């Protein structure tokens, strides 16, 4: 894994140091125009960092495709599919999973990966949300399917309160 992630980890370390030093400059800078420029720089640096994380996920997928008999590669994909940067790779994760041998697919990691892919597909952009039931603030049961014919649905989750509002407009 070290060799697989060597370049991306090096990039992440370098950019991370730049982000840290940039944050110090933001805190120390009194000039509001300079502060805005430094914040733009920080956003740019975070974008580079995020792209390196996506590159890492792609490297994991490519490596797994070359090693369809490896449970360790299935575990590597399993760790990637659960991360934020893996959210745009559903089709590639699915393809890599199907490329594994049946024995790897039926391993503990493979079964867990299959389950993760099922939930990933349901939460993918453009997919229908899975139905759920819960109590609202008045202790009445609500189901997401109660709002099926509404054009827009806003769901707000708070630790103790849940609102589901449907709108026909």
Image (cartoon, helix red, strand yellow):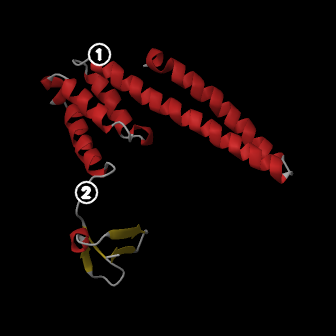
Q: Secondary structure at mark 1?
A: helix
Q: Is residue 97 left or right of residue 52?
A: left
Instruction: Specify the quadrant that holds the N terminus.
Output: top left
Q: Mark on residue 128?
A: 2
Which of the two discs, 1 and 2, labels the residue nearer the N terminus?
1
Q: Is residue 27 visible?
A: no
Q: Is residue 104 above or below residue 45?
A: above
- Residue with the mark numbered 1: 66
- x 38%, y 34%: residue: 80
Q: Is residue 33 visible?
A: yes
* Image position, residue 81 (x, y; %): 35, 37
Instruction: Specify the quadrant that holds the C terminus.
Output: bottom left
* Residue ranking furthest to the bottom: 138
Q: Is residue 30 above or below residue 150?
A: above
* Image position, residue 131 (x, y; %): 22, 63
| Label 2: few (<14), some (14–19) or many (≥20) C-alpha neighbours in 10 Å | few
- x 34%, y 19%: residue: 63
* Image position, residue 55 (x, y; %): 46, 27
Q: Is residue 69 above or below residue 26?
A: above
Q: Is residue 159 left or right of residue 110?
A: right
- x 28%, y 20%: residue: 65
| Label 1: few (<14), some (14–19) or many (≥20) C-alpha neighbours in 10 Å | few
Q: Is residue 59 above or below residue 82?
A: above
Marks 1 and 2, Cα distance to the nearest angstrom? Answer: 33 Å
Q: Secondary structure at mark 2?
A: loop
| Numbered disc in front, either 1 or 2 | 2
């Amino acid at each position: 894994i070290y060799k697989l992630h060597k370049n991306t980890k090096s990039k992440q370390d370098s950019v991370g140091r730049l982000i840290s030093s940039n944050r110090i400059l933001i805190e120390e800078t009194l000039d509001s125009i300079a502060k805005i420029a430094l914040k733009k720089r920080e956003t740019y640096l975070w974008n580079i960092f995020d792209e390196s994380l996506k590159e890492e996920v792609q490297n994991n997928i490519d490596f797994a495709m070359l090693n369809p008999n490896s449970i360790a590669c299935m575990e590597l994909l399993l760790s990637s599919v659960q991360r934020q940067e893996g959210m745009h790779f559903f089709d590639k994760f699915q393809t890599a999973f199907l490329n594994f041998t049946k024995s790897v697919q039926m391993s503990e990691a493979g079964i867990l990966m299959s389950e993760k892919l099922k939930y990933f597909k349901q939460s993918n952009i453009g997919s229908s949300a899975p139905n759920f039931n819960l109590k609202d603030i008045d202790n009445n049961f609500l189901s997401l399917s109660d709002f099926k014919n509404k054009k827009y649905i806003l769901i707000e989750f708070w630790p103790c309160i849940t609102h589901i509002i449907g709108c026909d407009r």
